[in-house]
Image (spheres, grey):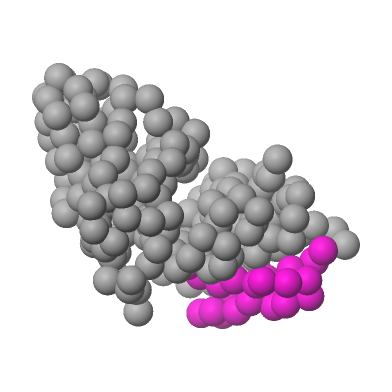
């Protein structure tokens, strides 16, 4: 089974801090994704990556950046955290860019910005 | 662009009742279709999938058939349990969109004993 591991289940940070959310997958997947999930807004794609050192903006990239230095690891960075970034963050991976294979999700990180 | 519409919840049922969650889609290409389930406090888990027209996906007693003529992928289960209480998401993946998922808004299901 595919295992997508997010480093923290719960995280509390302060406004203005630089926040790192880490995600690791163990199945040599090429694609990795970061979403946020908010009540009434569903899942929204923040950033994604099809390969090492590659990144593409999703639907709501403002206030975020990402890093993919190794194939198995995809980090989401909040450059200067703000209260409106309090949310559930979900990482996912899938096999290849044009394969239409399902995405596999981690357990999520519930981030609170105070 | 692509879109997925699913019935709004919450859907409240008694144990052993029949569950249907409607899902329709719009896509420019030939998408694959998925149902994901999210239990309280957890991430999304793939429940079932179908990759072409008339395919039936099934898992844990849940079924959904890819209907191209009606652009639908309705989720059904014949006899629900309390443990099926969760949020269910319909989603599509279009190769032309590079394997990005388009999600429906999610349907919360509550099964009472």
Residue A100 falls in which quadrant of the image?
bottom right
Picture residue at 51% right of the left edge, 79% below the top: B60
Q: Is residue A21 left or right of residue B13?
A: left
Q: Position of residue B46 (x, y in %)?
A: 47, 67
Q: Position of residue A58 (x, y in %)?
A: 47, 38
Towards the viewer: A33 or A112: A33
Picture residue at 21% right of the left edge, 44% below the top: A21
Q: Residue furthest front?
A: A53
Is residue B45 among what the camera can see? no
Residue B71 falls in which quadrant of the image?
bottom right
Residue B94 falls in which quadrant of the image?
bottom right
The answer to whether residue A14 is magenta is: no
Q: Does residue B99 sit above or below A81 in this rendering? A: below
Is residue A91 among what the camera can see? yes
Q: Does residue A27 sit above or below A53 in this rendering? A: below
Picture residue at 32% right of the left edge, 55% below the top: A52
The C terminus of chain B - image quarter: bottom left
Towards the viewer: A96 or A23: A96
Query: In this picture, which residue range is highlighted in magenta?
Result: B45-68
Q: Is residue B63 left or right of residue A67?
A: right
The N terminus of chain B - image quarter: top right
Q: Position of residue A2 (x, y in %)?
A: 34, 73
The answer to whether residue B49 is magenta is: yes
Q: Does residue B43 sit above or below A67 in this rendering? A: below
Towards the viewer: A6 or A70: A70
Q: Is residue B99 left or right of residue A19?
A: right
Picture residue at 33% right of the left edge, 71% below the top: A28
């Amino acid at each position: 089974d595919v295992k997508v591991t997010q480093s923290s289940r719960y995280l509390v940070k302060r406004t203005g801090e630089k926040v790192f959310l880490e995600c690791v997958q163990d199945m040599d997947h090429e694609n990795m994704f970061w979403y946020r999930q908010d009540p009434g807004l569903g899942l929204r794609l923040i950033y994604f990556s099809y390969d090492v050192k590659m990144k593409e903006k999703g639907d709501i990239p403002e206030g975020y950046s990402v890093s993919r230095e190794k194939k198995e690891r995809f980090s989401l960075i909040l450059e200067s955290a703000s209260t409106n970034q309090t949310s559930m963050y979900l990482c996912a991976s899938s096999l290849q860019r044009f394969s239409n294979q399902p995405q596999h999700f981690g357990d999520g990180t519930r981030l609170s910005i105070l | 662009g692509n879109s997925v519409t699913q019935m709004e919840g919450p859907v409240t049922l008694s144990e052993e009742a029949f569950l249907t969650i409607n899902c329709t889609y719009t896509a420019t290409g030939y998408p694959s279709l998925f149902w994901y389930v999210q239990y309280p406090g957890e991430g999304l888990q793939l429940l079932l999938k179908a990759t072409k027209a008339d395919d039936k996906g099934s898992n844990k007693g849940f079924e959904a058939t890819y209907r191209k003529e009606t652009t639908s992928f309705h989720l059904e289960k014949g006899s629900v349990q309390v443990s099926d209480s969760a949020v269910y998401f319909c989603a599509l993946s279009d190769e032309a969109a590079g394997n990005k998922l388009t999600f429906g808004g999610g349907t919360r299901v509550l099964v009472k004993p």
